[in-house]
Image: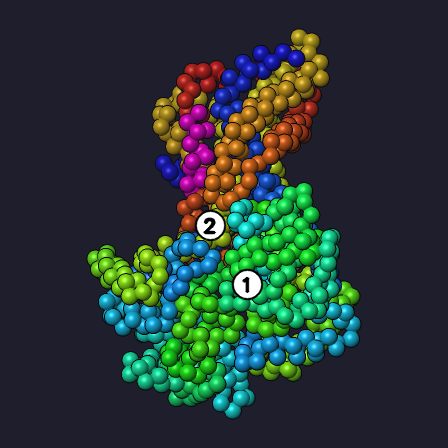
């Protein structure tokens, strides 16, 4: 039956080509605009590290060490003093823990022939590679002993290794960073989170994740004059260049914890609260600490990682798709009603209402799929236009298999939905009256 | 024209009529809100800014040796002043539209009543000229005031004088002369020595609502925290001066990361995503109107075909072509009007929703009649073709039994 209805629909489509073209084009434009907006929204609002960040939590507390002249108001803050960050990591209360901050440095070969300026990386205390799931290609991560001894070691990204040494396998070589030489002990595959989620408190601009090109233990980095990207929040005055003298009076590290179960989260939350309370009681934190864990997504939502424009675009595109659907429903109604005569004959020959309904719904679904097919190049065009825009999230406009599947399902659903009302309308009239009209 | 026959005829085509009304409703609501979003952004992009935007080149330094920061800034200023074509230089802590917000509370009374958020700008000697500030009342800072003030541990000025924008003066002391008054901040009090034309904040969203112009200027000697070099020149010289300035500073500070921009570029960069959002919204509006128009054309054509017999009978009974034309035009007007009435409700509901989620103001009332007119015109244009075709149906059709 299905193939017969499909054949009928195909025959009918050939009868009134410009009308069919208009229907399909309208649906395609609606679907394409919706898909473009959804693709960008999806890329920005998902997990930054699929399979890993869902279990990552950031510790927040009011860690101000002096009365704030700007007021007592507190909004959840993740930046910690190095001392607190180390204490939380050293406690080993979670499945994995690391304190980190973004860092910007110039990295050069020792002979100075090859250099990369403004390279972004992470300064970390703890096993940063395993907690964030950064894949290692060569070598090894630093050991707790190296970290404790403040050994000048560094793990670099494969791209940086290629740029400096012409080969990805740079293990054993040394690089000049800050005022010192660091030995390369490991090389990671190129790695970047899908969206920004580290150091959001100091974030401005792009919602997208940036590639991290080096991972360096924080102690050795500070000794060697490698500095964090920003000096964070500092007590007593502006800090323009971050130096070891400022380490103590600034809050600039973030502590992240891998907590794989709800029970682990509850347990860790209790520990965190107790730790912060103890610091408050000891007089180090002047305000009630209000310690709290935030999951990755909740933390991103709090910092509005997805720009408002992107959300507005989704709402607008949704409204636009709805309008296109109503439009197509109207045109379909006209199209179906024009053929009341055919329907009357079919009904008189014994076709049930349900069969007539199904026949018309199948035609609508077919048009919907055709709209989806046409929407494919239009979506690609839309994403291309977005990529050409000077906006921070432009690189998120990428077409993928997932997008294609969503598009196919969406177009079929749209086709069936818009066909529903007209199909119901056309099968409703009694056959006798329709024959008379015919 | 009697509308009763139109209504009873529409009752026979409830579903297509309902769909047209729904389409108009949606188009009205979505279009009005999209246009409102466009208008908001255009307003913000056109905010005037009373500095010499066309003559300013900005150079930033990052990674200057901190042991002698003040000396580095002083040397930099001297070197930049020597570039041919540069008429004035200064170093500042921030600039309008750079996202680098230095926020502080200010008040007009010692009791700190009516606390306002303001953006703090610190500038070294020559700042007024380098930025091209326009003095409205009072005076600029003296060389002595520049030479003695610095920035203290709580980001406040250690000086005693301040220059404020007209907008802030009007907010703090409405209807009074601001020059000579004391401005209170968390760090102390400062005598207002001058009032300048409105200068934008580093970020126009930061002070909340419409406080784009709550800016205050303090004098400062070269030192910590002033990391923007500002050079003023003729607009045509800026590119050359930018390159020269980067070269000059690189020589002085080989280890630092030095970047240069014209202020026009900074403004363009600040508003880039806003501009692209405007284009996207406008594109959607145009396509949406097109889709709506095609929908009306399609359904009207269908009605015309369906009613050929009736039209023929009406023509036989004496209806003129104009009557038939008017019939379809009136029908379209009724449908669009119904859609617009429903659309008003939906448009306001969407606006309220967006207000609650995205800090948008309320849509002005005049948008509603304007939107209605647009859709009426669109509807009439769309129906014109099918209606004309209907008016050319010959009376003889009636005798052929459809």
Mark 2 vs mark 1: same chain?
A: no
When asked about the image quadrant of residue B319, the answer is top right
Q: Residue at x 42, y 79 (%)?
A: A222
In contact (CB < 8 Å): disc 2 and disc 1 = no
Residue A417 is one of the magenta-drawn residues: yes
**Magenta part mainly helix, strand or loop?**
helix
Front-most of residues B19 and B28: B28
The magenta region covers: A412-425
Report x, y in % for residue B83: 75, 76
The residue at the point 25 percent across, 70 percent down is A91
Where does label 1 land, which residue? Answer: B156
How many neighbours does mark 1 have within 10 angstroms: few (below 14), some (14-19), or many (20 or more)?
A: some
Residue A38 shows which numbered tag? 2
| Element type where label 1 sits in the image | loop
Residue A8 part of the magenta segment: no
Relative to A394, residue A35 above or below:
above
Q: Residue at x 48, y 48 (%)?
A: A311
Image x and y of residue A383, in percent: 53, 55
Which quadrant of the view contains residue A142?
bottom left
> Which chain contains the residue that carries disc 2?
A
């Amino acid at each position: 039956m299905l193939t017969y209805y499909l054949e009928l629909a195909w025959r009918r489509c050939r009868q009134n080509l410009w009308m069919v073209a208009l229907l399909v084009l309208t649906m395609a434009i609606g679907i394409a605009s919706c898909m473009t907006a959804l693709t960008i929204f999806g890329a920005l609002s998902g997990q930054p590290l699929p399979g890993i960040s869902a279990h990552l939590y950031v510790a927040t507390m009011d860690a101000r060490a002096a009365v704030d002249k700007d007021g007592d108001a507190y909004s959840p803050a993740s930046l910690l003093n190095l001392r607190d960050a180390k204490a939380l990591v050293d406690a080993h209360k979670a499945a994995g823990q690391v304190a980190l901050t973004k860092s910007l440095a110039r990295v050069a070969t020792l002979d100075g022939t090859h250099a990369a300026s403004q390279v972004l990386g992470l300064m970390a205390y703890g096993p940063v590679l395993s907690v964030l799931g950064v894949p290692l290609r060569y070598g090894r991560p630093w050991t707790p002993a190296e970290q404790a001894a403040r050994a000048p070691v560094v793990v670099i990204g494969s791209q940086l290794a290629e740029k400096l040494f012409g080969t990805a396998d740079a293990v054993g070589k040394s690089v000049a960073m800050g005022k010192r030489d660091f030995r390369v002990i490991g090389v990671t595959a190129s790695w970047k989170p899908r969206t920004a989620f580290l150091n959001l408190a100091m974030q401005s601009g792009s919602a997208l994740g940036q590639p991290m090109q080096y991972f360096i233990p924080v102690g050795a980095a500070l000794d060697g004059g490698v500095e964090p990207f920003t000096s964070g929040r500092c007590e007593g005055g502006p800090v323009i260049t971050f130096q070891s003298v400022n380490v103590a009076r600034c809050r600039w590290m973030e502590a992240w914890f891998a907590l794989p179960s709800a029970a682990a989260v509850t347990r860790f939350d209790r520990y965190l609260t107790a730790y912060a309370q103890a610091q408050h009681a000891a007089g180090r934190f002047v305000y009630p600490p209000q310690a709290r864990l935030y999951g990755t997504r909740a933390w991103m939502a709090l910092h509005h990682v997805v720009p408002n424009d992107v959300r507005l675009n989704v709402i607008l595109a949704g409204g636009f798709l709805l309008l296109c659907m109503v439009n197509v429903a109207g045109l379909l109604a006209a199209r179906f009603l024009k053929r009341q005569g055919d329907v009357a004959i079919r009904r008189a020959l014994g076709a049930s209402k349900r069969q007539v309904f199904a026949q018309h719904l199948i035609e609508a679904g077919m048009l919907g799929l055709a709209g989806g097919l046409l929407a494919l190049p239009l979506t690609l065009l839309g994403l291309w236009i977005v990529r050409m825009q000077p906006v921070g999230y432009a690189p998120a406009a990428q077409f993928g298999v997932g997008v294609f599947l969503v598009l196919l399902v969406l177009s079929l659903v749209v086709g069936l939905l818009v066909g529903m009302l007209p199909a119901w309308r056309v099968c409703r009239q009694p056959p006798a009256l329709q024959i008379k009209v015919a | 024209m009697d509308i009763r026959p139109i209504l009873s005829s529409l009752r026979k085509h409830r579903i297509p009529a309902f769909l047209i009304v729904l389409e108009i409703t949606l188009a009205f609501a979505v279009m009005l809100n999209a246009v409102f979003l466009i208008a908001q952004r255009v307003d913000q992009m056109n905010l005037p800014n009373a500095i010499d935007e066309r003559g300013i080149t900005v150079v930033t330094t990052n990674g200057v040796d901190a042991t002698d920061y003040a000396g580095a800034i002083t040397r930099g200023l001297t070197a930049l002043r020597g570039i041919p074509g540069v008429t004035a230089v200064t170093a500042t802590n921030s600039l309008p539209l750079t996202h680098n917000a230095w926020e502080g509370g200010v008040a007009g009374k010692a009791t700190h009543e009516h606390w306002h958020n303001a953006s703090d700008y610190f500038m070294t000697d020559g700042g007024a000229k380098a930025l091209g500030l326009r003095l409205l009342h009072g005076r600029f800072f003296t060389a002595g005031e520049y030479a003695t003030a610095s920035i203290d541990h709580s980001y406040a000025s250690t000086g005693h004088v301040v220059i404020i924008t007209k907008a802030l003066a009007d907010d703090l002391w409405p209807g009074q002369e601001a020059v000579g008054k004391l401005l209170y901040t968390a760090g102390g009090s400062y005598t207002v020595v001058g009032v300048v034309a409105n200068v934008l904040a580093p970020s126009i969203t930061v002070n909340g609502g419409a406080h784009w112009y709550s800016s205050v200027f303090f004098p400062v000697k070269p030192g910590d925290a002033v990391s923007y070099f500002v050079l003023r020149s003729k607009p045509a010289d800026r590119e050359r001066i930018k390159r020269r300035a980067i070269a000059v500073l690189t020589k002085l500070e080989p280890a630092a990361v030095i970047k240069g921009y014209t202020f026009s570029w900074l403004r363009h960069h600040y508003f880039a995503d806003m501009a692209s959002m405007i284009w996207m919204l406008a594109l959607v509006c145009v396509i949406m109107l097109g889709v709506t128009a095609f929908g009306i054309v399609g359904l009207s054509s269908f009605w015309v075909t369906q009613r050929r017999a009736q039209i023929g009978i009406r023509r036989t009974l004496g209806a003129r072509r104009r009557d038939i034309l008017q019939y379809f035009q009136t029908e379209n007007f009724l449908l669009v009007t119904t859609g617009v009435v429903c659309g008003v409700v939906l448009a306001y509901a969407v606006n309220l929703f967006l207000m609650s989620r995205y800090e948008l103001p309320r849509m002005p009332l005049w948008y509603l009649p304007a939107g209605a007119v647009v859709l009426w015109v669109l509807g009439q244009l769309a129906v014109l073709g099918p209606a004309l075709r209907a008016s050319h149906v010959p009376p003889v059709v009636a005798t052929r039994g459809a």
